[in-house]
Image: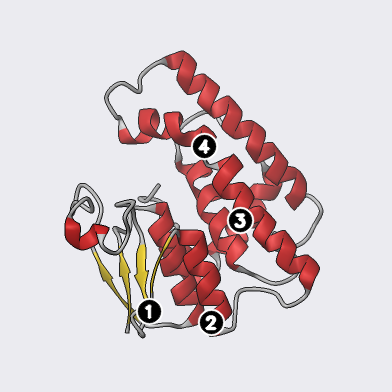
Amino acid sequence: MVRVLGRVTSINVRKVLWALDELGISYEREDWGLPLRDPKVPEYLALNPNGSVPVFVDDDGFVLWESNAVITYLAHTRGGLLFSEHHALARALQWMSWQATELNPPWMYALHALVRKTPGYDDPAKIAESTARWTAKMDILEAELARGRPFIAGDDFSIADIVLGLSIHRWFIVPFDHKPMPHAQAYYERLKQRPAGARWMPDDMV
């Protein structure tokens, strides 16, 4: 049986768990990541030298880290959640990269300040700057979703929707004055209608 090492409160761990559920793959999960279990120990660093979650261990012993790499591997090896048509495939990979490099970084200060209450993250100007930059990135996604495709890369659900769904979930859950995003809201509701989407985007996980 495959194994996933990481705490469910991690958005990146939930990417992998959602993909596994969509593909109908049984798995075992182990809690790793603070505050539950320190990943900066030799046992864990031997699997992932970054000391971050998740780590995926396939049933043949193959070890992989970085959540987008893991879910791409799962889609490729298990035959689902990705496209053979090259334009749709490219769009899916494009939006997965965009989520990691463009959408994620702006939210960090706001997340630490408004949800995690991390000491030192209490500057109102920096909170406002973080939410403004986050909103600007969400405007890009809103415009793309306004094109009318049911999913980000086309007519079919893919791993790119898992990645973006969890990010949109975070957007709606973090408490601040949100700009209306009707297309993102409708997309989010569609994703929550999927059993795995509802499971891994609960209201008590950010």
Amino acid residing under circle 1: Asp
Judge the density around disc 4: few (<14), some (14-19), many (≥20) Cα neighbours within 10 Å: few
Disc 4 from disc 1: Cα separation: 30 Å
**Any mark on residue 77, and which?**
2
The x and y percentages for residue 53 are: 34, 56
Disc 2 versus disc 3: nearer the observer: 2
Question: Is 31 located above or below residue 195 in the figure?
Answer: above
Q: Which residue is drawn at 40% across and 47% down?
A: 206
In front: 115, or 5? 5
Judge the density around disc 2: few (<14), some (14-19), many (≥20) Cα neighbours within 10 Å: few
Disc 4 from disc 3: Cα separation: 14 Å
Please indicate whether residue 98 sits to the left or right of residue 20 in the image. right
Label 4, on which residue? Answer: 105
Label 1, on which residue? Answer: 58
CB atoms of marks 2 and 1 within 8 Å: yes
Amino acid residing under circle 2: Thr
Of labels 4 and 3, earlier in sequence is 3
Judge the density around disc 1: few (<14), some (14-19), many (≥20) Cα neighbours within 10 Å: some
